Image: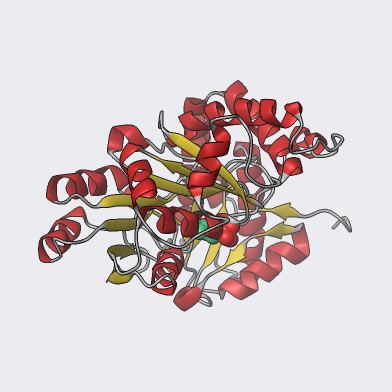
Amino acid sequence: MLKDQAFLRIPGPTPLPPSVERAMIRPMIGHRDKAMDALIADLIPRLRPLFGTSGAVYLLAGSGTLALETALVNVTDEGDKVLHLITGAFGERFFRIAEGHRRQAIPHHVPWGEAVDPDDVRRLLQAHPDVRAVVATHSETSTGVLNPIADIARVVREHSDALLVVDAVSSLGGTPVEMDVWGVDAVASGSQKALMAPPGLALVALGERARAAMHRIQSPRFYADLRQYEASLAQSTVPFTPAVTLLFALEASLDLIEAEGLAHVFARHRKMRDMTRAALKALGVPLLAADAVASPTVTAVRPTRFTPKALLQAVRDEFGIVFASGQGKLKDEIFRIGHMGYLSEADVLQYIAALEVAAKRLDPESPLGAGIRAALEVTLA
Ligand SMILES: Cc1ncc(COP(=O)(O)O)c(C=O)c1O
C-alpha cells in the first residue's frame, strides 16, 4: 500500500473535490469587505434548493452539533415540551441538547436500525397535546436509517401546532429535503458530509413559522441567536467573523452540485446505496436497516462471521480504505460505510472489491466475486 494513500469511506467528513481544496487557498478577505457581502449574497440563495425552501438559511462557524443546538434554542423556550423521535446516537444527542437547555424533553425511542412509525407520532401527539416542537433525525448516521420526514411532517401538521425540527446533517445534499413541500419548520445540517466541503460550517434553515417563533421566544442565546444573523443578512453581511475559507470551499462545492444537477446528485447517491447493499447481500453479510428505510448516504453492516473490528482493520491495512465503526450501543456490532459527497460508482466498486478480499481472508467460505457481480448488475440496470 502506498504510504499516504487513504480512501475515506466514513459517513463524514468526506473526501474533498480538488476544486474545493483549491478554493481554500484563495487569499483571505476581510469580513467587512465588499467581497464578503458578495459571497454571502451569492451563497444563501444557492443553498435554498438543497433545503427545499424559499425561507431563511443561516451559516454559522461550528460543527453540525452547533446547527442542532442553534435550531433548538431559536424555536423553543426553556420549559417547552419537545418530543424527540430517537432512532440512534444522533437522535440521542439532540435529546441531550434539549435537556441541557432545560426543555421538557420527551424521548420516543425506536429500536436502532428501524425508522419512526408516523402512527406512533400521532399517538404521542394525542397524549401530549401541548408539545411545542417535534425533533426528528432525517438520515440517522449511526444506523443508516432514513426516517420518513414527509409522513412525520404530515402527522405533526394534522395533529398539533408543534414545530417540526429536523437534523439533516447526513442527508442534506445527498437526498431530497423538501422543507416547504413537506411542512418542515427548521432544518439543521453541516458542511462535511454530502455537501463535499470540510467540517466547520453549521447550516440552519427556518421556515416562516420557525422564524416567527425565533422572534417571539425568550430563550437565552448569543452566538447562536439567529436574529443577529437575520439582521446582518438583510444587509448581505455577517454578525461575526465567519469561517471565510470554508465559505470559499462551500461556494466551490455548490458549483459542482449545480453543474451535476440536484436530480442527478440524488440518483447517484441512491445508486451507490443500492450497489453497496446488493453487494453485501450477495456476500451473505447482514445489513442493519431494511431496504425500505435505507439511507442513500450511509450503510450500517452487521457481520456475523467476522467482527466489524477485524474487517475495518483488514480493509485499512491492505487497501487503505477507511470505513467507520459503530456508535453507542452498536459500537462493536456494526461497521458503517459512508457513500456520500464526492464519491461515485467507481469508488463503490473499489471498496466492494476490497471488502470482498477482506471478508475472504476472515471467512474462507465468503464467495469471492459475488459482491462485485451484484454491484455491477445494479450499475448496468
Ligand atoms: C445525523 C447527524 N447529526 C449530527 C451530527 C453531528 O455533527 P458534528 O459531528 O459535525 O457536530 C452528525 C455527525 O456525524 C450526524 O451524522
Image: 194 above or below 289: above
Q: Residue at x 69, y 62 (%)?
A: 315
User: In terms of image quadrants, where is residue 212?
Assistant: top left
Q: Residue at x 43, y 49 (%)?
A: 295
Q: Nearer the viewer, residue 183 or 221?
A: 221
Q: How many marks?
A: 0
Q: Nearer the viewer, residue 163 or 19?
A: 163
Q: Position of residue 24 (x, y in %)?
A: 80, 39
The answer, for residue 6, to whether it is visible in the render is yes
Q: Position of residue 276 (x, y in %)?
A: 51, 49
Quarter of the figure that contains the C terminus = top left
Q: Residue at x 63, y 60 (%)?
A: 323
Image: 180 above or below 214: above
Q: Residue at x 82, y 53 (%)?
A: 5
Q: Is residue 26 left or right of residue 376?
A: right
Q: Is residue 87 left or right of residue 348?
A: left
Q: Nearer the viewer, residue 209 or 191?
A: 209
Q: How is colour applied across the structure in the image?
A: secondary structure
Instruction: Tell me which image quadrant ligand 1 sits in.
Output: bottom right
Q: Position of residue 192 (x, y in %)?
A: 63, 49
Quarter of the figure that contains the N terminus = bottom right
Q: Is residue 116 left or right of residue 68?
A: left
Q: Position of residue 68 (x, y in %)?
A: 47, 57
User: In terms of image quadrants, where is residue 34?
Assistant: top right
Q: Nearer the viewer, residue 137 or 344?
A: 137
The answer, for residue 291, to whether it is visible in the render is no
